[in-house]
Amino acid sequence: METMMRRQSSVVLGSNSGPRSLQMDRHYAHSMSGGAGGHGIRISTATHHSRVGSGYSGGYDYQSSGSKTHTIGNEKVAMQHLNDRLASYLETVRSLEKANSKLEIQIREAIEKRGPLEGKDFSKHNAIIADLRTKIFNQIKENAHIAISLDNAQLATDDFRVKMEYELSMRQTVEADVVRLRKVLDDTNVIRLHLESDIESLREELINLRKNHETDVAELRAYITQTSVHVDVDAPKGQDLAKIMEEMRAKYETIARKNQEELKAWHESQITEVQVQVTESSAALKEATTVITEIRRRYQGLEIELQSALSMKASLEATLRDIEMRYNMEVEKYNAIIMRLQEELTQIRSDIHGNTREYELLLNIKVKLEAEIAEYRRLLDGEPLK
């Protein structure tokens, strides 16, 4: 900013009195022509109206007759006219010198009051700009840290969500296994009940067989007892019915014992198999229950961590919004300061430019007047008019 406000110029215009204005409404144009022998000199003058003022107490106005043509019959009248014109120009020059002196005084006063732009100390503005840059840089760093924290929180949330989905999948799988094992256990219980029912039926059948066997044996014994005399009389010698009955009894008892042992062995094997299945199902059910308990515990922990991460994310987002709002307010405030400084700089440049143009215009008028004065001096000295 300091470089922008510097202007490499040896003259600085402007003061508290306000801007000056200088107008050149018209210019001078002179022509002279002379006849033979110096008689019949003709001077044609196009009069111009010049005004210097509107800000200087030493302003002036001068006006001569416009677009007049005079014919002078002798050199004395022409020289008298030139002397009058010269006196008018000298008075104009003195007025311009007074205005120029006053302008130079005002320039010096403005320089003393404001100080030269080249040597003006803008360290205060540089400090403000440096402080603003530091604050903006720190704010950018803080926003970057917050953005990184938000990204980390988002990644952690995604990770927890993936873990939760995996644990939910495992839980559903284990629950499906538990349901299947319960179904197997129910089927096993049904089979056990059927087997117990079959065992009871077989026991009842065995009891009935024993009763029937005992009944048959009793009937045979009774029949043999009733018919033993006839048998002894009519039966041929050498046949022993008691022995035959004993053999039949032994045979039936052997068959019954064999059937009972086979039934008992089959029943015990079925009971053992059912007990093994029940034990395996109970162990699987217990293991599944343990796994479900562990999964529920982990699920609750993950749910708590997820809620904590979501709360942290919401808090960070609220902090970020607050910081962005404060940052925008600070930026707007600093932008207003910068705009005000730029407007002041633009006004200073405009004042400098206007004062410079006024000064250059005054210098041009002075140079033109000095040239005309020199021309008239040459005429007074007897040199030919250019």
Image (spheres, grey):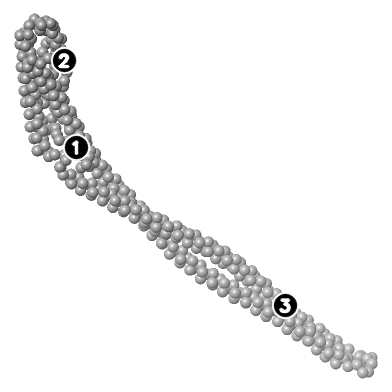
**Looking at the image, is mark 3 or mark 1 earlier in the sequence?**
1
Q: In the image, what residue type sits under mark 3?
A: Leu
Residue picked out by circle 3: 202
Which image quadrant for residue 221? bottom right
Residue 284 x %, y %: 57, 72
Q: Is residue 352 above or below residue 161?
A: above
Q: Is residue 195 above or below residue 26?
A: below
Q: Report the quarter where the C terminus lies.
A: top left
The residue drawn where x is 17% and y is 30% is 356
Q: In the image, what residue type sits under mark 1?
A: Arg
Residue picked out by circle 2: 29
Is 237 left, or right, of 37 in this rendering?
Answer: right
Residue 347 appears in the rendering? no
The residue drawn where x is 13% and y is 21% is 371
Residue picked out by circle 1: 7
The residue drawn where x is 33% and y is 52% is 143
Which image quadrant for residue 110? top left
**Looking at the image, is mark 1 or mark 2 earlier in the sequence?**
1
Q: In the image, what residue type sits under mark 2?
A: Ala
Q: Is residue 36 above or below residue 331?
A: above
- Callout 2 crowding tier (Cα within 10 Å): few <14, some 14–19, many ≥20: few
Q: Report the quarter where the N terminus lies.
A: top left
**Looking at the image, is mark 3 or mark 2 earlier in the sequence?**
2
- Callout 1 crowding tier (Cα within 10 Å): few <14, some 14–19, many ≥20: some
- For the residues labelled 3 and 1, the Cα–Cα distance comes to 125 Å
Which image quadrant for residue 172? bottom right
The residue drawn where x is 10% and y is 33% is 107
Of residues 380 and 219, which is closer to you in this image?
Answer: 380
- For the residues labelled 3 and 2, the Cα–Cα distance comes to 154 Å
Of residues 23 and 92, which is closer to you in this image?
Answer: 92
